Amino acid sequence: MNYRRLGKTGLEVSEIGFGGEWLERHDEEHSIDLIHYAGQKGINIIDCWMADPKSRDIIGEAIAGSRDKWIVQGHIGSTWQNGQYVRSRDMRFVVPAFEDLLKRTGGGYIDLGMIHYVDAQEDWDRCMGSEYIEYVKSLHRDGIIRHIGISTHNPRIASLAAESGFIEMIMFSINPAFDMRPASEDIEVLFGEYESGLCGIDPERAELYSLCEQNDVGITVMKPFFGGRLFDVKSSPFGAAFTPAQCIHYCLTRPAVCSVLCGYDTKEQIDMAAGYETASDDEKDYASVIASAPLHSYTGQCTYCGHCKPCPKDIDIAMVNKFYDLAVQQPEEPESVLSHYRLLKNKASQCIGCRGCEQRCPFGVPVAERMEKAAALFGE
């Protein structure tokens, strides 16, 4: 298992994570065994947005005795009222629900205390400066939550969080289909019908990834498989099917993404997700699927897929393109991006313009021209 630094939290999280929402489907013994098995595979981050006692008890029992080896992403504002999950900012419900989470998961702390599920501007505005957000900050000051995060499906809210100064990481919904959708306050829009003719990543989503990279705000991913719809040619908005490895690789090639949280019913599904780490380049190749899809196109847009390799000058073209895109989306080149670029062994200025990479690019990206622009922008 490979690990990535989760932004300014400094935590090293497994590239493959555990999304816990399916735990309540099974008996406790089975679900506890799944978490144990995931830990053996090197998975070390688990999300608990669920408010139901069963799911929380399963997680607590499964990580008991190894609490310090797990990074728990626990949500503040996910409450259990009259046997039902209710998202709430009402402190009469928020406080006891969080204290219940703390008790059932054990250890006396939550690694990532998540401002739970903010998709609407009105909800964001209401939260900021409220008793609810002061409660979150007090938990952080007291060390009960180690770091403050937020979960959202809306890139506009996520961008506000990335620039807030106190939110250290974001749980955000990412997959090739969602990335083509414009921002919305209604999650159902993401799952709705996709019109043909959509082209490339929505600009607000691209800007979000840039802001997170610039502000050192790490991203954990939810809904990487589009609820399984991407696996079936009939339900995929692309009119083409992806594999789990391709979806995971797509997520992990987005700037600032650190861990992809998958849901599991079986050990075989854990093996499939964790198998990403030993998959070949061909098995990870999402770009060929997108490029050949009959319904959508990313023509002219670099997706950082790596098809351009090998370069005779050993330039990491995908990374140069990523840093260039991150830099030009800001009024001034962020120092963090410049420093990352300078660490590259070979720079854009070393491009000899052979254009072999352009022949291999599935999206028709003018690579040599972009190398010239990157060299001019970064000065080398």
Image (tube, helix red, strand yellow):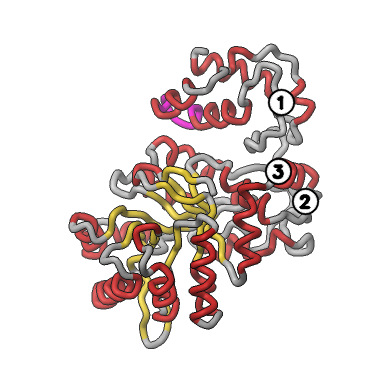
Q: Amino acid at mark 2?
A: Leu
| Residue lying at 76% horizontally and 56% vertically, measured from the top left | 241
Q: Residue at x 41, y 25 (%)?
A: 332
Q: Nearer the viewer, residue 36 or 210?
A: 36
Q: Secondary structure at mark 2?
A: loop
Nearer to us in this view, 316 or 362:
316
Taking 107 as reference, is 259 above or below it?
Answer: above
Give the crowd class for mark 1: few <14, some 14-19, many >=20 residues within 10 Å. some
- Of callouts 2 and 3, the N-terminal one: 3
For label 3, the residue is 280
| Distance in Å between CA atoms under marks 2 and 3 | 27 Å
* Predominant SS along the magenta part: loop
Q: Is residue 160 visible?
A: no
Which tag, 2 or 1, sits closer to the chain's start?
2
Q: Amino acid at mark 3?
A: Ser
Mark 2 vs 3: CB contact within 8 A: no
Tell me the distance, in whole angstroms, between the alpha carbons under discs 1 and 3. Answer: 15 Å
Mark 1: secondary structure: loop
The secondary element bearing badge 3 is classed as loop
Mark 2 and mark 1 in contact? Answer it, CB < 8 Å: no
Whether residue 118 is visible to the viewer of this picture, yes or no, is: yes
- Quarter of the figure with residue 319: top right
Q: Nearer the viewer, mark 1 or mark 3?
A: 3
Give the residues drawn in magenta, as a range: 327-334
* Label number found at residue 310: 1
**Of discs 2 and 1, which sits in the foreground?**
1
